[in-house]
């Protein structure tokens, strides 16, 4: 069993910055947004906004674009969408 390690504030800052960059791309191409809600252990909770909030492709946006990008830098991260 892998022990749970609380993320450092540096890691949280890096994740927050990464999500801001992802959100800027989502806003430019899809008129939506991605908001960091909370980081708890390796779980990153995000919320989609704008046009992405009600889009039928929101699951693909979260898992493909957001989680896929974050996992490139933080392979153990799990990204979940919250309302």
Image: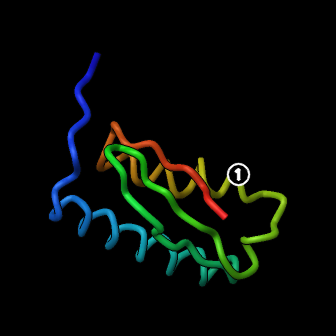
Residue in the picture at 53% in, 76% down: 25
Q: Mark 1 falls on what kind of element?
A: helix
Where residue 22 sits in the image (x, y, percent)? 47, 70
Tell me: 3 left or right of 54.
Answer: left
Q: Nearer the viewer, residue 28 or 58?
A: 58
Residue in the picture at 32% in, 63% down: 15
Residue in the picture at 22% in, 51% down: 7
Q: Nearer the viewer, residue 69 or 4?
A: 4
Residue tagged by mark 1? 59
Q: Residue furthest top?
A: 1
Looking at the image, residue 57 lies above or below residue 54: above
Where residue 80 sits in the image (x, y, percent)? 55, 50
Residue in the picture at 32% in, 45% down: 41
Where residue 16 sits in the image (x, y, percent)? 34, 70
Tell me: 18 left or right of 81.
Answer: left
Tell me: 46 left or right of 30.
Answer: left
Looking at the image, residue 46 lies above or below residue 28: above
**Which quadrant holds the N terminus?**
top left
Circle 1: is it few (<14), some (14-19), or many (20+) Cα within 10 Å? some
Q: How many marks?
A: 1
**Which quadrant holds the C terminus?**
bottom right
Looking at the image, residue 1 lies above or below residue 19: above
**Quadrant in the rendering for residue 2:** top left
Scheme by which the image is coloured: rainbow
Where residue 20 sits in the image (x, y, percent)? 41, 76
């Amino acid at each position: 069993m892998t022990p749970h390690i609380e993320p450092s504030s540096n890691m949280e800052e890096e994740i927050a910055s990464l999500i801001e960059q992802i959100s800027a791309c989502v806003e430019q191409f899809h008129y939506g947004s991605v908001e960091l809600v909370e980081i708890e252990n390796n779980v990153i909770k995000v919320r989609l906004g704008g046009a992405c909030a009600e889009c039928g492709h929101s699951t693909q946006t979260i898992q493909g674009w957001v989680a896929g990008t974050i996992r490139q830098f933080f392979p153990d991260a799990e990204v979940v969408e919250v309302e």
